[in-house]
């Protein structure tokens, strides 16, 4: 009898061990304004699949695309309250996660992609550190691209720009630029811009070509100015708390996979921008070349706005570091 009792006890123990629940997966919920089907969203989706495979399901990613979690401001609030864990930010959010990245996005900073690539690579450690100080962890930096002015009316100068209904976001840097240029702007969330163009509330908007196509702005504008106004960078970030919740054994895997997919996105964005501008022209949108005096006028506006932006919107340390790198790149 004793032997039977011992046998049943052993079988029960084996059964209990066999049915013990596996360790729960870490689920990371990320939101982005990038539309479903866009190249940015595809990069996130590819990273998600690879991470879940590489960690054998220990880390799972849930992505909410196309602004379904609200504006970037809404997403940041949901991260703060724990409803979300991070996001892919392309606009407002990146200024909160890493204010110093705004130095790179100041108008007329970069001349070409070579300067962009060499500068960003050298700035990455500094920007990652500043992001961490703001309570977030960088998973990867993404290219958003050079922005242009698109308009219902032709924009050939600052004067013609001032005469249109110009879109603005809630951005201190943008406000200083418009103040320096004497432009009265109309604020609107990104998700409301297309409707504003349809109703005539807005006539001039700004953004990279691929993004303009993705959100259908090209269907309402008739011109774009070929002047590259600003360069924009985005990124994928987790809150510090969410990053700490990732098992230590998988953190480098998660970071490296996101970083690789973000880097691989860059040439795709650039090619997509070329194709987007070609598509716009094929649809009857006219390109306007920039006269030297117009470029000089925009550069003067940027220089004036810098006086009220450096040390406020972004740190003097970020700007000085950026300028040092650019001088080294440009030296013959």
Image (cartoon, grey):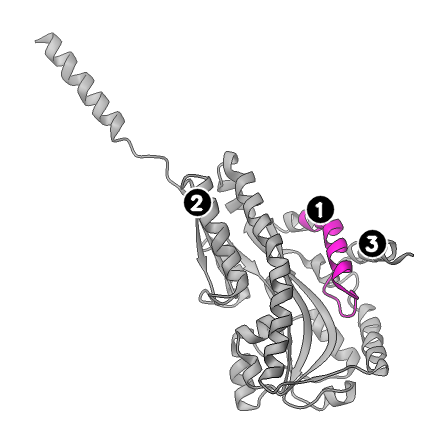
Asked if one can make out residue 234 in the rendered structure from this viewpoint, the answer is no
- Indicate the position of residue 182 as horizontal and vertical percent values: 77, 84
Question: Are circles 3 and 1 on residues that touch, CB within 8 Å?
Answer: no
Q: Mark 3 points at which residue?
A: 325
- Indicate the position of residue 153 as horizontal and vertical percent values: 67, 91
Mark 2, residues whose alpha carbon is within 10 Å: few (<14), some, or many (≥20)?
A: some
Mark 3, residues whose alpha carbon is within 10 Å: few (<14), some, or many (≥20)?
A: some
Residue sitting at the far right = 332
Of mark 3 and mark 1, the one earlier in the sequence is 1
Give the CA separation, mark 2 to mark 1. Answer: 27 Å
Q: Mark 1 points at which residue?
A: 125
Q: Is residue 268 placed above or below 47 in the rendered structure?
A: below
| Residue range corresponding to the magenta coloring | 104-128
Q: What element carries label 2?
A: helix
Quadrant the N terminus occupies: top left
Q: Is residue 28 placed above or below 208 in the rendered structure?
A: above
Residue 52 - label = 2
Left or right, 168 with respect to 84, comes to right
Question: Are circles 2 and 1 on residues that touch, CB within 8 Å?
Answer: no
Q: Name the mark nearer the viewer: 3 or 1.
A: 3
């Amino acid at each position: 009898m004793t032997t039977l009792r011992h046998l049943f006890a052993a079988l029960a123990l084996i059964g209990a061990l066999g049915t013990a629940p596996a360790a729960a997966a870490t689920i990371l919920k990320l939101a982005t304004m990038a539309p479903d089907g866009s190249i940015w969203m595809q990069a996130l989706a590819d990273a998600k699949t690879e991470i879940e495979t590489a960690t054998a399901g220990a880390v799972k990613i849930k992505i909410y695309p196309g602004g379904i979690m609200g504006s970037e401001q809404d997403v940041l609030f949901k991260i703060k309250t724990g409803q979300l864990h991070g996001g892919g930010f392309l606009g407002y959010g990146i200024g909160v996660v890493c204010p110093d990245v705004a130095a790179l996005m100041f108008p007329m900073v970069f001349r070409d992609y070579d300067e962009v690539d060499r500068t960003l690579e050298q700035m990455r450690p500094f920007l990652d550190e500043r992001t961490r100080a703001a309570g977030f962890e960088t998973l990867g930096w993404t290219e958003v691209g050079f922005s242009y002015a698109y308009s219902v009316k032709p924009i050939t100068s600052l004067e013609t720009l001032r005469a249109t209904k110009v879109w603005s976001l809630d951005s201190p840097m943008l406000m200083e630029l418009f103040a320096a240029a004497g432009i009265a702007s109309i604020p609107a969330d990104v998700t409301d811009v297309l409707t504003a163009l349809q109703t005539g509330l807005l006539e001039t908007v700004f953004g990279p070509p691929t993004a303009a196509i993705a959100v259908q702005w090209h269907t309402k504008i008739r011109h774009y100015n070929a002047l590259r106004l600003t360069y924009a960078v985005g990124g994928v970030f987790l809150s510090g708390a969410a990053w700490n919740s990732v098992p230590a054994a998988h953190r480098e895997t998660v970071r490296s996979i996101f970083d690789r997919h973000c880097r691989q996105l860059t040439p795709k964005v650039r090619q997509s921008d070329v194709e987007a501008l070609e598509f716009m022209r094929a649809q009857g949108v006219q390109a306007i070349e920039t006269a030297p005096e117009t470029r000089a006028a925009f550069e003067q506006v940027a220089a004036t706005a810098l006086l009220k932006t450096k040390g406020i919107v972004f740190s003097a340390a970020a700007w000085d570091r950026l300028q040092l790198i650019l001088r080294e790149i440009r030296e013959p």
